[in-house]
Image: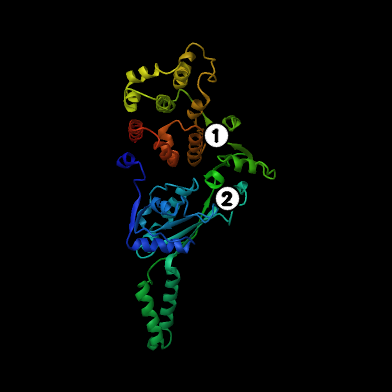
């Protein structure tokens, strides 16, 4: 991953946690019911997730109490605007935006000497079956402070009122309690520590629960798309819900997405053609085995690209050049169909979310398209970073160079 790190494409926006902040982080872990980390320093993202702690615990989603109870740790105001690298739900990033938009000033105040445990409460204690994800409606974001700092403030204010009452100013026991509180917590009188709950309405979303489920709600009947076949087979036994269910491998899914105006494909669109340029280069790289030139040179040099294209068998050549062939044939025959000219998986990778969808739904459908047809390295990086990192490890060094160049060139 060194090349990605150098290019600032591998978790480059994480912030360091060390010293006193590690102690506060561990208090949050303990308060949420998790074990402390033994690490003396590590990095965290916008939700308080750390790749180093995840590796130590051998658990990617170590901030979850089961699949139904995700949490967040806010240790510093610097987390504002940071990416969420391993979201359990597709709306986790938006949740964090709302948290900092509403409570930014209070968070800055509190994290001077404390930390915040955040609970994303969807009123579900535990999942029992895949269709439990349909219960997602409103997420209530709740906050708790380590050392019960908010409760300590109330106690301190009550002691001050007691001190002022009658002749209590001469009561040494009250003096001692006030001094003890002040020494432990400081002067809390002017501190605003009250973080009100935030209610977030859930629309369509993706969840890692049950092996990964896309929940598309904006239609008469919700559409559920399962990544895990066992979860899908379990879900279709339930006939009590009016929902459409598909596994990602089912061909009928694509037709349903088109007919419901969830995805569309305009092969003349400039963005589609730019994506196709990346896709056909990626397809050729998959086919080539031993080459005289580095992959990066082959994919970036039009002469070399044509040279190696003509070295592969005709079937593979047709797959790589499917859209070019279709557009060429369409010049003389306007009625020609895509089927049989462009491979199904390539054609699917050229689709985009329907223009009528809302921005957050478009992001969700981009992720679904990338899951169904991961042929565009740029969109794979944008919408499924973990899968991108997984594939990246298997590419040769020159292919890695081309991918990094392609992604950086899009910025």
Residue under the point 44% across and 75% down = 155
The crowding category of the residue bearing disc 2, from other C-alpha atoms within 10 Å (few below 14, some 14 to 19, many at least 20), is: some
Q: Which badge, 1 or 2, is on the more N-terminal residue?
A: 2
Mark linked to residue 307: none
- Observer-nearest residue: 388 or 326? 388
The answer to whether 73 is drawn above or below residue 399 in the figure is: below
The picture places residue 50, in percent across and down from the top left corner, at 40, 52
Question: Outermost residue toward the left?
Answer: 6
Residue 101: x percent and y percent?
Answer: 42, 53
In the figure, 357 relative to 321: above or below?
below
Q: Secondary structure at mark 2?
A: loop
Residue drawn at (43%, 82%) of the image? 162
Query: Which quarter of the rendered picture does the C terminus lie within?
Result: top left
Q: Secondary structure at mark 1?
A: loop
- Residue at image position (41%, 87%) is 168
**Horizontal placement of 134 versus 281: left or right?**
right
Residue at 47% x, 49% y is 92
Residue for badge 2: 137
Q: Position of residue 29 (x, y in %)?
A: 44, 61
Q: State if disc 2 and disc 1 touch (CB < 8 Å).
A: no
Image mark count? 2
Measured along the vertical axis of the image, is residue 327 above or below residue 14?
Answer: above
**Where 253 falls versus 19 (above or below)?**
above
Residue at the disc numbered 1:
262
């Amino acid at each position: 991953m060194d090349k990605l790190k150098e290019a600032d494409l591998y978790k480059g926006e994480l912030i360091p946690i060390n010293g006193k902040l590690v102690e506060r982080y561990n208090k949050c872990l303990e308060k949420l019911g998790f074990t402390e980390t033994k690490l003396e320093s590590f990095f965290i993202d916008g939700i308080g997730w750390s790749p180093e702690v995840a590796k130590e615990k051998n658990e990617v989603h170590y901030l979850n109490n089961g699949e139904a109870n995700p949490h967040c740790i806010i240790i510093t105001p610097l987390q504002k605007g940071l990416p969420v690298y391993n979201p359990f739900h597709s709306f986790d990033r938006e949740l964090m935006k709302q948290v900092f938009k509403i409570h930014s000033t209070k968070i800055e105040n509190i994290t001077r000497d404390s930390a915040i445990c955040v609970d994303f409460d969807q009123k579900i204690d535990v999942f029992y079956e895949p269709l439990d994800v349909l219960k997602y409606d409103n997420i209530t974001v709740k906050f708790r402070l380590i050392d019960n700092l908010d409760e300590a403030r109330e106690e301190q204010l009550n002691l001050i009122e007691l001190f002022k009452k009658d002749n209590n100013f001469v009561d040494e026991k009250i003096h001692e309690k006030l001094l003890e509180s002040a020494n432990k917590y400081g002067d809390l009188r002017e501190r605003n520590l009250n973080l009100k709950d935030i209610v977030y309405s859930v629309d369509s979303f993706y969840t890692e629960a049950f092996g990964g489920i896309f929940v598309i709600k904006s239609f008469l009947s919700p559409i559920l798309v399962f990544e895990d076949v066992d979860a899908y087979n379990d879900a279709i036994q339930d006939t009590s819900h009016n929902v459409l269910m598909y596994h990602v491998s089912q061909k009928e899914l694509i037709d349903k997405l088109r007919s419901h105006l969830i995805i569309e494909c305009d092969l003349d669109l400039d963005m589609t053609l730019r994506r196709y340029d990346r896709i056909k280069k990626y397809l050729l790289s998959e086919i080539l085995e031993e080459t005289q030139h580095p992959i990066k040179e082959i994919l970036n040099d039009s002469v070399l690209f044509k040279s190696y294209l003509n070295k592969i068998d005709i079937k593979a050549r047709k797959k790589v050049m499917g859209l070019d062939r279709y557009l060429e044939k369409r010049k003389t025959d306007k009625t020609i169909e895509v089927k049989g000219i462009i491979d199904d998986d390539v054609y699917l990778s050229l689709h985009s979310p329907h223009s009528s969808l809302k921005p957050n739904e478009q992001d969700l459908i981009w992720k679904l398209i990338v899951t169904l047809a991961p042929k565009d390295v740029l969109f794979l990086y944008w919408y499924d970073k973990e899968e991108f990192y997984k594939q990246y490890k298997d590419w040769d060094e020159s292919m890695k160079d081309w991918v990094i160049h392609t992604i950086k060139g899009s910025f």
